[in-house]
Image: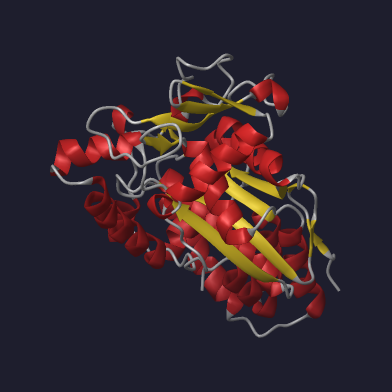
Amino acid sequence: MTTSRLALAGEPLPTVGHARAYVCGITPYDTTHLGHAATFVWADVATRVLRRVGVTVEVCRNVTDVDDVLDAAAADRAGSRFDSFAAVGQFRFDRDMAALGVRPPAHEPRAHNHVDDVVRLAAGLLERGVAYERDGEVLLRASAVGLADRVPDDGSSQVPPSARAEDPADPTVWRPALTGEAAWPSPWGDGRPGWHAECAAMALSVLGPAVDLHVGGADLRHPHHTAMGAMAEAMTGVRPFARARLHVGTVQVDGAKMAKSAGNLLLVSDLLESWPAAAVRLLVLDRPWAQAWDVAPGEIAAAADRLEGLYAAAGRHVDGQAAVDAVVGALLDDLDVPAALAVAEAEGGEAARVALSVLGLS
Ligand SMILES: [Zn+2]
């Protein structure tokens, strides 16, 4: 028998019954780079491990198709409306995820279908006295929900504080639209949802008041996930919003985060032209999930070689339940892929086949 829980950051997940996972998804304005892929491949492995031990996992991965950056990119590059531009980005993303063997989520809500839910969320937070309205903007009062003292983990992907905020830590739930932006009606005038509120509204609508696992890149931990959780908790009274969290370490090139502005993107589609998809997955997975890492030159070639070795080990005629249990046990222990692979390589046979299958490498 293996251990009966999947240990991750937060409460361990019981390995019986049903689990709900919310994965913060893409803003579909660019092609998928290795940093995006890492988040979704790790989310995929967490759900495969849970399924391996008998848990049914319901995954909701949203699409942030109401977004300031997306609007600007659509207008700049395609001269198109945000929604048709987002559809093209979505198509490319789906193609890359399918190539990488990331299973499609059960639910894929799009922000533009949940604007009414954000309006109701804003109204509910005002009614509960934890939000305030200023000139058409609704803001969550950070001090009322325990957000005030948190420092952002990574300034690069954060929303700058609103000029209307009483405290810079107060996140926007709803805001007035600027000229030319897509806008929706609300009791506070025509406007748009705040980013954190979009995800909170989608999670509440699709999965209910709480989730078992919340997944995203490490740069989303705070304020995106903390604000989103605080809005959901204040609305429903159910705490915590997320029992466990998987915040995947940032992928860097020469010590810098991958970013379009830095010109250092490693696109998944480019990698897949030269390397098997399983080698790209192994490159992402063969390390602690929370750790930021630099893509070293030659590392993808080493991953491809190691994969060949694993396939050879899987072909050996040995089996032993203890080795299989050791592989699954390592994965249940904070998704320790390096430990699982070490057992798979040493023992071979069924243990290696199980490792390849659960990691989506076969
Ligand atoms: Zn999100």
Q: Residue furthest front?
A: 187
Compare residues 286 and 78 and report the one nearer the observer: 78
Above or below, comparing residue 253 to residue 213 in the picture: above
Image coordinates for residue 97, horizontal then vertical, percent: 40, 61
Residue 317 in sight here: yes
Question: Is 321 positioned to the left or the right of 119 in the image?
Answer: right
* Picture residue at 36% right of the left edge, 62% below the top: 94
Residue 164: percent from the left, percent from the top?
47, 16
Please give left or right for residue 220 compared with residue 6 in the image: left
Residue 164 located left or right of residue 332: left
Q: Is residue 346 visible?
A: no
Q: Quadrant of residue 354?
A: bottom right
**Residue visible at 43% across and 26% down in the picture:** 136
- Residue 341 pos. (x, y %): 65, 61
Q: Nearer the viewer, residue 268 or 169?
A: 169
Quadrant for the N terminus in the image = bottom right
Q: Nearer the viewer, residue 294 or 68?
A: 68
Residue 277 higher or lower than 202, as above or below: below
Tally of numbered tags:
0
Q: Is residue 328 above or below residue 13?
A: below
